Amino acid sequence: MSDTSEKQEAVRPRPFPDDASADYWRAANEGRLAIQRCRQCRHWNHAPSMNCPACGSVDLAFEDVSGEAKLFSWTEIHHSPGPAFADKLPLLVGIVELVEQPHLLLVANLPGSRAEDLRLGMPLQVEFERISEDCALPQFRAVGGQS
Ligand SMILES: [Zn+2]
């Protein structure tokens, strides 16, 4: 039984996969981090696009990556972007650099870390937070973290 009281769980906003990113989200839902890669020049690309930003080829596919990353930058959010985040504040959002290629960047939550523990370049590992039956979000946790 649910009611309309404030205790009712707020719905997390969900990503909306498009033609370029559908395979990325499908892999995430299966617990895999798959990144778009050019079959011509082997350049990794994120966010997914319809053309390789390095050579312009449309011959693109998704390949699984290691899930290892380094912290490139981060921000600490103190004002909830929506009711679903009210109990998650302060929310740590990172820009992480995947080890597969310099400046292969991905924006993700940083669960299990406190802002004062974060260091540029610290090693991170992907994990997945399931937010619905058919959607899981890649996010990154400090390797050997104190959580
Ligand atoms: Zn290319």
Image: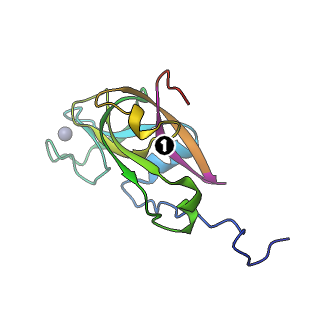
Residue sitting at x 36%, y 55%: 20
Q: The C terminus lies in which quarter of the figure?
A: top right
Q: Report the front residue among 147 and 127.
A: 147
Residue sitting at x 28%, y 53%: 49
- Residue farthest to the front? 116
Amino acid residing under circle 1: Pro
Q: Does the magenta portion include 23?
A: no
Q: Report the front residue among 5 and 61.
A: 5
Characterize the local packing of mark 1: few (<14), some (14-19) or many (20 or more) Cα atoms within 10 angstroms.
Answer: many
SS at mark 1 in the image: strand
- Residue farthest to the right? 1
Please state the quadrant of the image where ligand 1 appears. Answer: top left
Q: Quadrant of residue 128?
A: top right
Q: Does the magenta portion include 138?
A: yes
Left/right placement of residue 45 relative to residue 107 reads left
- Residue farthest to the bottom? 4
Which SS does the magenta portion mostly show?
A: strand
Q: Which residue is mark 1?
A: 138
Q: The N terminus lies in which quarter of the figure?
A: bottom right
Is residue 63 in view?
Answer: no
x and y percentages locating residue 123 in the rendered image: 38, 25
Is residue 47 in view?
Answer: yes
> Which contiguous range is marked in magenta?
131-142
Residue sitting at x 63%, y 67%: 10
Residue sitting at x 46%, y 51%: 91
x and y percentages locating residue 39 in the rendered image: 27, 35
Q: Is residue 19 above or below residue 10?
A: above
